[in-house]
Amino acid sequence: MPALHIPGHEHPRPKEVSLEEIRSLMGDCQLCPLGQTRTNLVFGVGNPSARVMFIGEGPGKNEDLQGVPFVGAAGKRLDSLLSLANLTRDEVYIANVVKCRPPSNRNPKPEEIAACSPFLREQIRSVWPDVLICLGNFASQFVLQTEKGVMSLRGKLYQKGHFIVCPTFHPAATIYHSDWEPLLESDLTMVGAWLAANPAGPGKE
């Protein structure tokens, strides 16, 4: 994955580059064809010093219209699930693997992920959370650098460098697969237990 050149930051340390600088660098991004079909670029939202960062797949219709991630049915479902990890929406940061809606909500293509993922990498380095919760296959495979599916990955926490990683189902998937819902709930409860056992360090809320 190529590193971004961020003006004024030759070898940036974690948390050195602000989210605003990364968003500014994206501008009216046209690095892949999704830039031509989107309504709004959906960068990310939430606490810039969050202990927990959620990573989804890509914007849906409502997100594309509003320019904010997780505002549709999946967003309402996520809001209701946060309490299982003793979290609130204003405590977390939320982003996606790709920042523009794939037409008809199709899966993002490898070249679209390749074009967009350097920005996600910089978002992660800017927030520098303790826990990354990966919602669905694309986020889980990107962060854990694996081809395994979330069904085989979920149910445990992984140490990936600085981060604890929790791969789990996308809330939208549980709307159509109700039998996955208790598994997602179990995963978020597991994250809550980890957070309780590992209190926040300096600079984290």
Image (cartoon, grey):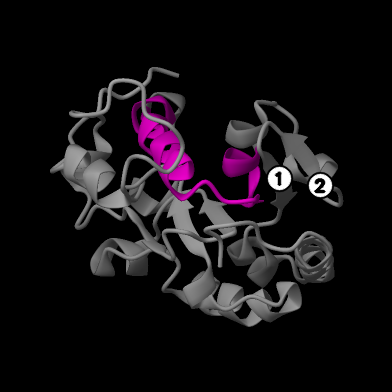
The dot on residue 165 is: 1
Q: Which quarter of the figure is the C terminus placed in?
A: bottom right
- The amino acid at mark 2 is Leu
Badge 1 marks a residue whose secondary structure is: strand
- The amino acid at mark 1 is Val
Magenta includes 146? Answer: no
Q: Residue furthest front?
A: 202
In the image, what residue occupies the spot 48% across and 61% down?
Answer: 93
In the image, what residue occupies the spot 42% across and 52% down?
Answer: 105
Judge from the rendering whether residue 37 lies leftward or rightward of residue 146; answer left or right.
Answer: left
Residue 179: where, in percent of width, then height?
A: 83, 68
Q: Are marks 2 and 1 in contact (CB under 8 Å)?
A: yes
Badge 2 marks a residue whose secondary structure is: loop
Q: Residue furthest top?
A: 2
Q: Residues within 10 Å of mark 1 (few under 14, many from 20)?
A: many
Residue 147: where, in percent of width, then height?
A: 70, 26
Q: Residue furthest left?
A: 28
In the image, what residue occupies the spot 78% across and 59% down?
Answer: 198
Query: Where 61 falls versus 53 (above or below)?
Result: below
Residue identifier under label 2: 157
Judge from the rendering whether residue 25 lies leftward or rightward of residue 88; answer left or right.
Answer: left
Residue 51: where, in percent of width, then height?
A: 59, 59
Q: Quadrant of residue 158?
A: top right
Q: Report the span colored magenta.
A: 112-140
